[in-house]
Amino acid sequence: MTNELVPRYLLAGESALVVEFGAIIDPKLHDRVLALDAAVQQANISGVTETVPTYRSLMIHFDPRILTTDALIATLSRLAMPSKAHREGRQRWHIPVCYESPHSEDISEIVSLSGLLPARIFDLHQGACYRVYMYGFAPGFAFLGGLPRELTIPRRAAPRAPVLPGALLIAAGQALIASCAMPTGWYAIGRTPVKMFDPRRTQAFLLGIGDEICFERIDGAAFDALARAAEAGESCARSEILEEP
Amino acid sequence: MRGRLRVLHAGPGTTLQDSGRHGYLRYGVTPAGPMDWTAFRTANFALGNDERAAAIEIPPGGVEVICENVPLWVAFAGGAFVWRRGGVTLPIATRLHLQPGESLAARAGADGAFAYLAAAGGFDTPAVMGSRATHLRSGMGGIEGRMLRAGDVLPVAAPAREPDGEALIDAPWLARDSDPFRVVLGPQDDYFTAESLTEFFAGTFTLTAAADRMAYRFDGPDIAHARGHDIVSDGVALGAIQIPGDRKPLVLMADRQPTGGYPKLGHVARADIGRLAQMRPGEGCRFRAVSVAEARLALLSREDEISTTQQRLRPLRGVFTSQALFEANLIGGVIDPLE
């Protein structure tokens, strides 16, 4: 058994290091990843080029001309871990979502896989509170935890045709927001007009890792209006700073 | 006046690349950048460019470009491609002063999968999130996020100083050899049985046709997992050797996603990534385990070698030079005096 309080330092070539806190998807474990991420950024370690938080680990990329793996591990093990720094500035986002046809593209498949009625499926998905765990696949493609257990359905055996940008996807107990058209092994439950990634905006990526998300239901007409505003460069999503518990 | 290079022909997959889009991995942004950083850097250094300057990455389909308005200093290096100015074949790595109306063509030669064409000052297309590197899947960088095609015009930034003559680039570090690729084990080497790790370092692997800017898939002995092939996604670095369910290695290259969900046996040392990128489907290779310290020293010494590019330049003589071409009246007819 690994002691989850002591991270494992795993080699990823001569130019990157993985600091692993565990092997599961869990908010407490993710908090530790984010705490280390904040500490590394605060420490401004010479040679560290960028960091990538994931569900369970932090990947630290560095310039081997300036830093060695051993020196980095030594620095990390001495690093003071601020208990709350990573929580500062965390936000709760209110993201508009349309579950009406044609935006709930794969609802009939989700019905047959979950055994639930469409209204119940939408209520469950919309009623939950999600956390942004990491990005993957493509720019702005956000992986969310917090999907209600009743909506756990398997991934597709083979990828479906590309979903539309803004599609909300579910599979394998997780939720995703697609930022661009992409073939996927997941199921589209609804769609948001909000652009998760828009290089024209000052804040190109809307969501911070560790942020919370609530979905707000809108109808097809509201979707169309917001989609036009998003196209013009507006963010179309509200947020507030999360209070400390 | 700013120099311009016009594309007359570009084979599939020809893109503009700089040293990559860095700082946005955490948001899912692929770094892109050159497949063979050693050849890319050699071409830039031959011109006195910064190691980050944008250059054209040329797959086997080749390119043909023409110098538009003012003379341009260019340099190329990479696999053993066939480069021709006018009717004359040039050395595989060369620095040239292209005259307006003069064209330069490259196509695949004896070996190698990529060549780089750099211009003194660097190609000056709009940067997206701090980089000119093209990433086709997300449609970012280069020209409109796409491959280069005939008709594209690439502006060139003014160089800090002019190179001093046409030259042959003597870059022995770009020579191909059959040494095994060096590999640092981790982060998930413990997901494999001891026998399969032995198998990996003893076996010969063949590059399959499934080789693109994202990943190179190899065929060879089965690499069995000890504890399944699905992991909770974690970070992915250049050269990661993923072993998915089919037990065949997949080496992640310039267009890799920043995170992934298959166990990674190890990472190909960055010093050897360029040589691996130059493999063609059907070619074979082996892997050799090294310590992380050894991989780092190999990278540093490779970088030191490449930084001697300028000192190793040799004057280009005889039939290769513009002067000789003018005298032979090979290109005089294609220069528009009004340009």
Image (cartoon, grey):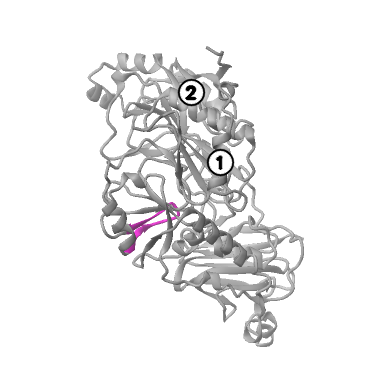
The answer to if B214 sits in the magenta stretch is yes
Query: Quarter of the image containing the N terminus of chain A?
Result: top left
- x%, y% of residue B291? 46, 55
Q: Is residue B322 visible?
A: yes
Q: Which residues are magenta?
A: B205-218
Q: Which mark is residue A74?
A: 1
Camera-side residue: B209 or A146? A146
Q: Secondary structure at mark 1?
A: helix
Q: Are marks 2 and 1 in contact (CB under 8 Å)?
A: no
The answer to if B179 sits in the magenta stretch is no
Mark 1 belongs to which amino acid? Ala
Instruction: Report which quarter residue A228 is drawn in.
Output: top right
Tell me if residue B240 comes above or below residue B160 in the rendering.
above
Q: Dot 2 surroundings within 10 Å: few (below 14), some, or many (20 or more)?
A: few
Q: Dot 1 surroundings within 10 Å: few (below 14), some, or many (20 or more)?
A: few
Q: Residue at x 56, y 18 (%)?
A: A239
Camera-side residue: B49 or B12? B49
Tell me if residue A218 comes above or below residue A8 in the rendering.
above
Lateral position of residue A199 relative to residue B337, left or right: left
Instruction: Report which quarter residue B329 is drawn in.
Output: bottom right
Residue linked to disc 2: A224
Q: Earlier in the sequence, mark 2 or mark 1?
A: 1
Tell me if residue B169 comes above or below residue B208 in the rendering.
below
- x%, y% of residue A112? 22, 24
Q: Residue at x 72, y 75 (%)?
A: B165
Q: Is residue B150 visible?
A: no
Lateral position of residue B294 relative to residue B323, left or right: left
Same chain under badges 2 and 1? The reply is yes
Q: Secondary structure at mark 2?
A: helix
Camera-side residue: B214 or A72? A72
Tell me if residue B326 comes above or below residue A213 in the rendering.
below
